[in-house]
Image (cartoon, grey):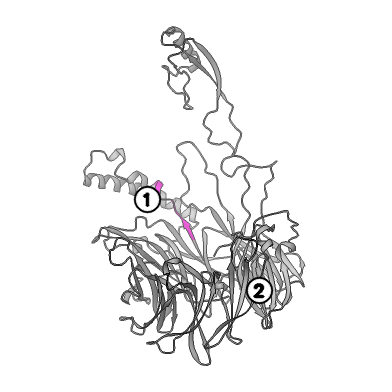
């Protein structure tokens, strides 16, 4: 796996221990021989309740349909017999009162139509409103393997399953749940000390269902770290507090504030109890940030609008435990937070989550994008470590880095109303507090705006006390930032070239410090014509004050998934080869490509060595495929490059490009076109 931190392994959909390769393919966990995928395979299907039509029930409401109600409807002319009308009304409405009134089901028992020349009394069947009726036959989606962790003889699969639960409906008194997770996560630990090669499944050691939606995971020294988010519906708590409610009519501001505060205080205990029960926190707040610490905005009375929009949870577990009761003991810490998690950064001692949201600026009278940083100590049981709020948003996980007790974070702040520039790009340096300094991360320093006006950050990489930043609007400024002085980070070098890089990867050739950039080329003569192909740049960063682009390679009309999915990038330092996924589509009968390219990298050249195609034009356009899709990944075993993409696995000689073997995952499942989905499915999460 292409990891950000050297001693911390990141979760991914493909893992290998050198002998076996493990891959999550939709709801199927595959394992195949690393040197010959045709020589033995293991298939583990995730449990799935495949509801049959005969026994189909709705996950929403259950129960029989109610019997229809016979309703008498009388039509009468303007001059009709009033006594007859009243009599009919009395007998049909069963005491409901005057003509046109509704019964308890909300249906008018007597309808008066005018302008007709005759009286006509009819009986019709009306279905009353139904709060416990079954829906049409519903089949939940299959479970989906989101990511894998591997440590020693243990493989962890993180699986998403649908979690929509019926609301116990009791008319208008029904109370919906506060935690609104549509999916649940199941963590399963498998023994891979003896992987079967006859198609049988791996041995399951333990499993655990946990609250929340998956954000990311890490592992180190047989320890697993899982980051999840539970989204909260606080409307049911807040709705009665708004000024427009009728009970506040006629009150002045002071009276309204007092009455709303009293109501909120009366509801707080019950709401908090329900919230803790649904989050399964067992009333223990010792490992949870205080909500007051997350107050946002420069005005203490102004926040991002909802400090309880979600609950971020960090779970720590031992991947090497004996699991005697088939359960996975987990220690948890968490925080209520605004916004949504954009990325995480983790070392072996601490994990930081970056929540993008908004805070109010009273000086401008505007809401502005902000990042709320939550730091957790994971050296033992997860516990609150530090918090901070900074302007703008990070682009991805590489925008953050921990160095010498300081957290560096690069953000872009958008302000569309500004006539001068719509963006502000900065690197913030924050001091991580020790045990005696409280929990707030104070900003030690920050850069001036990085790049030109209207440019935003496209890529970031940190090496020691230097930061490397790519900004872009029409051209690509490659910036070198000196971060050695925490209070005065500043740009020391700049290079401007056409196009941009969205991923930066440090390498070294013949003792020269270099940075590989993967991104898109832009036509310099017509920058508004759009991006016109993959661009690979090789930057010489030996002289921080004078970075240069030594060479580049442009693949016209192509796209590489490595621009955004950094785990699909692989560089081999020993052989100086770069392996990237490549896609090129014209939607015609010829010229479509889905596969990989192997490049040769030298100090002064980047050349294409050979391509690995995973599907033909006809297979892409007309083939029948399983309802899953593998993101591009590459591994190398004994000078053979294994590429995994879409529905197939291929092994190719790294030097001459000859195919060694091929494995079709759909054929291994024995589908025989029983499922027929298009080639491009999105059964995975980036």
Image quarter for residue 340?
bottom left
Q: Position of residue 426 (x, y in %)?
A: 35, 73
Mark 1 or mark 2: whose residue is earlier in sequence: 1
Q: Is residue 42 left or right of residue 575?
A: right
Is residue 44 inside the magenta stretch? no
Q: Which dot, 1 or 2, sits closer to the camera?
A: 2
Please tell me the numbered disc located at residue 612: 2
Task: Identify the secondary structure beneath mark 2.
Answer: strand
- Confirm whether residue 214 shows in the render: yes
Quarter in which the N terminus is drawn: bottom right
Note whether 126 is above or below 247 in the view shown: above
Report, in whole angstroms, how far the alpha carbon at label 1 lies from the one at label 2: 60 Å
Quarter in which the C terminus is drawn: bottom right
Please tell me the numbered disc located at residue 268: 1
**Residue drawn where x is 61% and y is 52% of the image:** 141
The crowding category of the residue bearing disc 1, from other C-alpha atoms within 10 Å (few below 14, some 14 to 19, many at least 20), is: few
- Confirm whether residue 225 shows in the render: no
Region of the chain picked out in magenta, as a range: 229-236
The crowding category of the residue bearing disc 2, from other C-alpha atoms within 10 Å (few below 14, some 14 to 19, many at least 20), is: many
Q: Position of residue 457 (x, y in %)?
A: 40, 71
**Residue drawn where x is 48% and y is 36% of the image:** 171
**Residue drawn where x is 61% and y is 72% of the image:** 633
Q: Is residue 646 left or right of residue 211?
A: right
């Amino acid at each position: 796996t292409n990891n950000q931190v050297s001693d911390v392994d990141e979760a991914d959909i493909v893992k290998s221990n050198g002998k076996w390769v493990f891959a999550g393919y939709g709801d199927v966990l595959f394992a195949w021989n690393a040197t010959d995928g045709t020589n033995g395979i293991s298939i583990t299907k995730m449990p799935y309740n495949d509801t049959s039509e005969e026994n189909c029930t709705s996950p929403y409401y259950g129960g029989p349909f109610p019997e229809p109600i016979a309703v008498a409807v009388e039509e009468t002319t303007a001059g009709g017999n009033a006594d007859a009308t009243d009599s009919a009304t009395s007998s049909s409405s069963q005491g409901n009162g005057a003509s046109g009134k509704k019964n308890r089901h909300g249906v008018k028992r007597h309808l008066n139509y005018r302008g007709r020349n005759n009286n006509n009394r009819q009986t019709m069947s009306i279905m009353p409103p139904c709060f416990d009726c079954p829906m049409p036959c519903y089949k939940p989606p299959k479970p989906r393997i989101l990511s894998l962790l591997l440590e020693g003889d243990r493989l962890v699969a993180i699986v998403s399953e649908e979690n929509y639960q019926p609301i116990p409906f009791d008319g208008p008194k029904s109370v919906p749940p506060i935690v609104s997770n549509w999916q649940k996560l199941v963590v399963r630990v498998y023994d891979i000390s003896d992987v079967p090669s006859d198609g049988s499944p791996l041995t399951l050691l333990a499993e655990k269902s946990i609250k929340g939606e998956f954000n990311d995971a890490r592992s180190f020294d047989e320890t697993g770290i899982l980051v999840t988010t539970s989204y909260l519906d606080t409307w049911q708590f807040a709705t009665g507090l708004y000024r427009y409610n009728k009970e506040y009519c006629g009150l002045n501001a002071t009276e309204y504030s007092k009455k709303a505060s009293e109501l909120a205080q009366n509801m707080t205990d019950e709401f908090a109890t329900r919230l803790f029960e649904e989050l399964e926190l067992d009333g223990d707040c010792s490992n949870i940030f205080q909500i007051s610490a997350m107050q946002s905005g420069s005005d203490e009375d102004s926040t991002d609008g909802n400090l309880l929009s979600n609950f971020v949870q960090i779970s720590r577990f031992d991947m090497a435990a004996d699991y005697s009761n088939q359960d996975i003991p987990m220690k948890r810490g968490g925080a209520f937070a605004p916004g949504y998690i954009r990325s995480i950064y983790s070392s072996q001692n601490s994990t930081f989550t970056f929540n993008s949201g908004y805070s109010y600026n009273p000086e401008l009278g505007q809401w502005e994008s902000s990042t709320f940083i939550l730091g957790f100590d994971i050296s033992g049981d997860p516990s609150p470590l530090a918090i901070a709020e900074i302007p703008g948003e990070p682009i991805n996980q590489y925008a953050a880095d921990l160095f010498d007790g300081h957290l560096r974070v690069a953000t872009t702040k958008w302000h569309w109303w500004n006539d001068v520039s719509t963006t502000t790009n900065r690197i913030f340096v924050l001091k991580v507090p020790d045990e005696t300094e409280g929990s707030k991360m104070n900003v030690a320093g920050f850069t001036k705006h990085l790049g030109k006006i209207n440019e935003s950050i496209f890529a970031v990489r940190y090496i020691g006390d230097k930061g490397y930043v790519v900004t872009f609007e029409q051209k690509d400024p490659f910036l070198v930032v000196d971060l050695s002085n925490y209070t005065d980070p500043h740009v020391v070098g700049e290079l401007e070239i056409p196009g941009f890089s969205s991923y930066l990867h440090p390498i070294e050739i013949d003792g020269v410090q270099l940075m590989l950039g993967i991104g898109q080329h832009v036509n310099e003569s017509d920058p508004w014509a759009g991006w016109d192909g993959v661009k690979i740049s090789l930057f010489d960063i030996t002289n921080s004050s004078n970075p240069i682009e030594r060479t580049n390679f442009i693949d016209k009309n192509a796209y590489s998934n490595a621009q955004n999915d950094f785990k699909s990038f692989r560089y081999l330092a020993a052989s100086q080869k770069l392996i990237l996924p490549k896609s090129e589509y014209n939607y015609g009968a010829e010229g479509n490509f889905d596969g990989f390219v192997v490049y040769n990298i030298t100090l002064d050249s980047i050349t294409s060595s050979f391509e690995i195609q995973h599907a033909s034009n006809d297979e892409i356009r007309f083939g029948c495929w399983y309802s899953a899709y593998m993101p591009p990944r590459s591994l190398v075993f004994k000078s053979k490059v294994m590429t995994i993409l879409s529905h197939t696995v291929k092994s190719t000689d790294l030097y001459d490009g000859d195919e060694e073997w091929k494995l079709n995952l759909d054929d291994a499942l024995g589908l025989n076109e029983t499922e027929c989905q298009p080639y491009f499915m999105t059964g995975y999460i980036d």
